[in-house]
Amino acid sequence: MPTATTTATATDLMIPPITIQAIGEEVAIKWADGAESFFTGERLRAASPSAETAGERDILGGLHGGQGPRDFSAVRVLGWDRIGNYAIRFDFSDGHRTGLYTYEYLRKLGDLQNP
């Protein structure tokens, strides 16, 4: 299963990726501090921070929308774009491309695989 090779701390969560590449069915990210994270398309798609996938909270904290858990086992990452100096937007084989994965979010997601 994909893992991150080091655990991010609060001070290094906004460290940018040096390299992002597709390796087989995974996306590999090498961070400026030397850490590496590996993600399957399924994992990235299921963790999409988009309102379409995760829903949106109103001012009182109520959750609206979001499709909830689904089977993304056949979903692959087709490409990606860097968004400013803070996020990556992935293009998925199911047509999804609206989630912005901040560097902080990706580091945390990678670290969850290797606590």
Image (tube, rainbow, N blue to C red):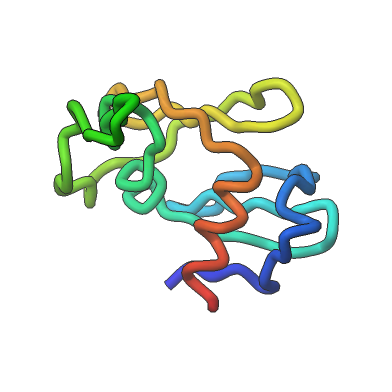
Q: Nearer the viewer, residue 97 or 68?
A: 68
Residue depicted at x 48% and y 53%: 26
Q: Locate residue 56 relative to residue 39 in the image: left or right.
A: left
Whether residue 106 is visible? yes
User: Is 107 placed above or below 96 here?
Assistant: below
Name the spot of residue 34 as percent of width and height, x first.
Answer: 82, 63
Name the spot of residue 60 as percent of width and height, x first.
Answer: 29, 31
Residue found at the very far right of the displayed protein? 33
In the picture, the quarter occupied by the N terminus is bottom left
Name the spot of residue 110 as percent of width and height, x first.
Answer: 54, 61
In the picture, the quarter occupied by the C terminus is bottom right
Residue depicted at x 17% and y 48%: 69
Whether residue 79 is visible? no
Q: Nearer the viewer, residue 18 or 12?
A: 12
Residue found at the very far front of the displayed protein? 60
Q: On the image, which quarter does residue 33 sit in?
A: bottom right
